[in-house]
Amino acid sequence: MIFLRSLAFQLLFYAWTLICAVLGAPFMFTPGLWMMRFGTEWSRVTLWLLRVTVGLTHEVRGREHLPSGPALIAMKHQSAWDTFAAPILFPLAAMVIKRELGYVPFYGWYALKAGMIPIDRKGGAKTLKRMVAACQARLAQRRSIMIFPEGTRSAVGVKVRYQPGVAALYSGLGVPLVPVAVNSGLFWERRAFTKRAGKIIVEILPAIAPGTERRAALAELQERIEQATARLVAESGGG
């Protein structure tokens, strides 16, 4: 049954994405935020498809911890679900994505048009400087920045070293750093086809104010996210 439900989602998801690939083409000639809003509707329907086929829903806690203005949002990354849900969880936020995604037909083109920020994960200091500059441009548009601090998806219970890019952004942007924990990997595992019914919990934690020394901020970010993630995993019966 789990396999059949997952297959139904996958088929419907591909059909919906194909439709959006066609409908999204005119938005390449509009302002970037128009494409962002179009992409948000793609995400909204994708989450709806997950609910009606697989029985997978989500709950968001701690929205009161989001600053009133733009912020740097650092979210735990366990599943492809995190990427699909991001535009719904944090409307209009510009996501830092790996450069290779920008080359993916339609998805990558539309993501770049919507203002997502590609980064070469193997790049050095110049890459970080370009990333900071691109993020500053998005902040000037009153858009928050979202980044997955591990740089890749990690399985439940596996700790991955947080990448220096998030620390560079924190010190270079001067906005609050918002940790976000999630237990999505319990229901949609890393690189897995099957999806389990249940409720993914996303928890937005209190922000780290600007001005903390960058290494201390990175350490605090990792500690907060990992502790909260472990608690959410245990709450949902994992771990």
Image (spheres, rainbow, N blue to C red):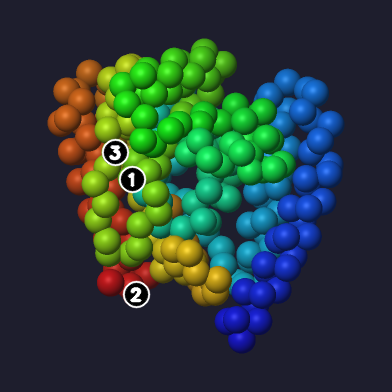
Q: Is residue 93 above or below residue 84?
A: above
- Separation of disc 1 and disc 3 at Cα? 6 Å
**Pointer 1 residue:** 150
**Relative depth, front residue between 84 and 65:** 84
Identity of the residue drawn at 73% across and 21% down = 31
| Amino acid at circle 3 | Gln
Label 2 vs 3, first from the N-terminus: 3
Residue ID for mark 2: 237
Number of numbered discs visible in the structure rendering: 3
Location of the N terminus (image quadrant): bottom right
Q: Is residue 125 visible?
A: yes
Mark 3 and mark 1 in contact (Cβ < 8 Å)? yes
Mark 3 — residue?
163
- For residue 233, which quarter of the picture? bottom left
- The 10 Å Cα crowd at callout 3, few under 14, some 14 to 19, many 20 or more, is some
| Depicted 40 relative to depicted 15: above or below | above
Name the side, left or right, on which 172 lies relative to 85. Answer: left
Mark 1 Cα within 10 Å, few/some/many (few <14, many 20+)? many
